[in-house]
Image (cartoon, rainbow, N blue to C red):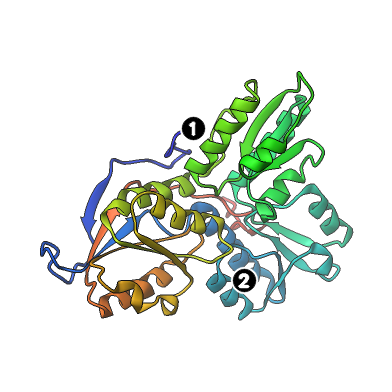
Amino acid sequence: MTEASPVDNFTTTAPTTTLDHPQGAAGDGDAKRVLLAAPRGYCAGVDRAVETVEKALEKHGAPLYVRKEIVHNKHVVSTFESRGVIFVDETTEVPEGANVVFSAHGVSPQVHQEAKLLNLRTFDATCPLVTKVHNEVKRFTKQGYQIVLIGHHGHEEVEGTAGEAPDDVHLVDGKEDVDALEFPEGTKLIWLSQTTLSVDETMRTVKLLQEKFPHIETPPSDDICYATQNRQVAVKAIAPKVELMIVVGSQNSSNSKRLVEVALQHGTKESYLVDYAEQVDPAWFDGVTSVGVTSGASVPELLVRGVLDLLAEHGFSSIEEVTTATEDLVFSLPRELRPARNAS
């Protein structure tokens, strides 16, 4: 498993540093500076999910129901709520015959069946990279494998993935879960993972699995998505160079929380997760001359800009954008929401 493997049209470049509208003296020894991670913010899957809701609203109007949060970001959710989107925890809360969007995190076959029984018009915003893991579960279980799924208990993505084969998927989230796993001798095993995990933590769990089950197989390609990996690589590049890292993202965002952990593990003294600039405590800046800024894969850029504006008010006016990869992957919308092709 590599830390930045290419996916389709996604390309990786050598680390470079570029200046992003600097307003201060970047070369001064005591100058306060910001290192801004790139890539950051929206990934292709989040772009697709948000646009799915936009297009469904445009085409069918409100009320529009969304099962769970479309993406794990408070700002995105509250913005859609103000436009008539109703977020529900379960499909059974949606009125019969209504329009419903499934979130980017994916759903189980049971949820699809519930929607069918309620005669719901569904728009599936599941990230294609999550769908890839679902398809792996179906393929490997048909081949007689028991699947060890590395992921976080209670996360929507894990619930949907495990729901493809509940009797054959075994969730592990660290050493205690691995220690508790037992399989009959000769059981065919393969591990898969949630797409938004820490690469390093996942590989530590994989090592534990391989020590306990030497015959466990590795999937043919990474399950941790390109965007999750890229944002972690960017943080690793910045972390040793800053005293404070601010990660913009919500508390229920797995990939955002992992960025905080990665920063602390790679040299940053303090790292905090905030939804908005208003949550930044100016006391964090005491004695600090260098701040790193990044954002999770479901965070709009305007929230990052708000943090940068706040930093500028506190003297951090020199901004250097540190680019470790470029991303140009785009996912198609659900078929029902794609623009009609003109006959010619």
State which tag comes first along the sequence, 1 or 2: 1
Q: How far apart are marks 1 and 2 (CA)?
A: 41 Å
The reply, left or right, for residue 121 in relation to residue 244 is right
Q: Is residue 261 above or below residue 171?
A: below
For residue 323, say whether it is visible.
Answer: no
Q: What element carries label 1?
A: loop
For residue 134, say whether it is visible.
Answer: yes
Q: Where is residue 95 in the image (x, y as percent from the top left)?
A: 84, 71
The reply, left or right, for residue 3 in relation to residue 132 is left
The reply, left or right, for residue 297 in relation to residue 147 is left
Q: In this view, does 291 lie above or below 184?
A: below
Q: How crowded is mark 1: few (under 14 residues within 10 Å), some or many (20 or more)?
A: some
Mark 2 is on which residue type? Glu
Name which residue lies at 71% across and 29% down: 140
Q: Nearer the viewer, residue 108 or 53?
A: 108
Q: What element carries label 2?
A: helix
Instruction: Please give the residue where the numbered disc 2 appears in the rendered image.
Output: 58
Nearest to viewer (mark 1 / mark 2): 1
Name which residue lies at 48% across and 39% down: 7
Q: Nearer the viewer, residue 184 or 148?
A: 184
Mark 1 is on which residue type? Met
Instruction: Please give the residue where the numbered disc 1 appears in the rendered image.
Output: 1
Q: Where is residue 169 in the image (x, y as percent from the top left)?
A: 74, 38
Checking the image for residue 16, the label placed there is none
Name which residue lies at 63% across and 59% down: 337
